[in-house]
Image (cartoon, rainbow, N blue to C red):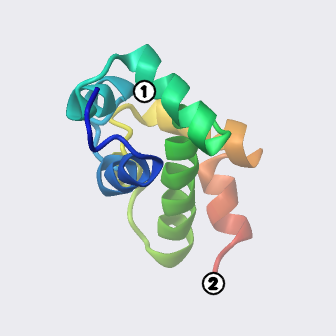
């Protein structure tokens, strides 16, 4: 077991890396030198939340800020928050906020 495996260390690693398109549960597990099921269980037990939900929250919060605070094209926003595939980003965003990124942007113009 990785001696540096603490809830704080995992959260810090996720916050620092979750906007990369290469970021995944596998990359977290590899960083801490544990298996994917182990890191998933560890995080759920320590944080009371699934790891994927934690980093999806971070990505969606960042996306909402970029949508309301910038004029970046949607594809660029998707990549900046860790989604290489635009349709995956739109689908996840709609699941999360109940509206598409475009609708969200129109509703939240500053």
Task: Say which quadrant the N terminus sits in.
Answer: top left
Q: Position of residue 79 (x, y in %)?
A: 33, 46
Q: Residue at (60%, 51%) from the top-left corner?
A: 101
User: What label sits on residue 12 in the rendered view?
Assistant: none
Quadrant of the image occupied by residue 46: top right
In the image, farthest residue toward the right:
98
Looking at the picture, tell me which residue is in the foreground, 24 or 84: 24
Res 91 visible = no
Looking at the picture, tell me which residue is in the foreground, 2 or 57: 2
Quadrant of the image occupied by residue 103: bottom right
- Left or right, 5 with respect to 71, comes to left
Q: Residue at (30%, 22%) from the top-left corner?
A: 34
Looking at the picture, tell me which residue is in the foreground, 34 or 14: 34
20 up-or-down from 105: above or below: above
14 up-or-down from 42: above or below: below
> What is the CA distance from the residue labelled 1 to the residue labelled 2?
39 Å
Q: Which residue is mark 1?
A: 39
User: What label sits on residue 110 in the rendered view?
Assistant: 2
Mark 2, other Cα within 10 Å: few <14 / some 14–19 / many ≥20: few
SS assignment at label 2: loop
Q: Residue at (60%, 32%) from the top-left corner?
A: 44
In this figure, what is the number of numbered marks? 2
């Amino acid at each position: 077991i990785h001696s540096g495996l603490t809830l704080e260390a995992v959260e810090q690693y996720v916050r620092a890396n979750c906007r990369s398109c290469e970021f995944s549960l596998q990359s977290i597990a590899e960083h801490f030198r544990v298996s994917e099921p182990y890191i998933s269980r560890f995080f759920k037990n320590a944080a009371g939340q699934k790891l994927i939900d934690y980093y999806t929250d971070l990505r969606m919060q960042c996306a909402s800020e970029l949508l309301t605070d910038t004029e970046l094209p949607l594809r660029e926003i998707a990549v900046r928050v860790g989604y290489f595939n635009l349709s995956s980003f739109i689908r996840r965003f709609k699941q999360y906020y109940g509206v598409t990124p475009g609708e969200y942007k129109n509703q939240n113009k500053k």
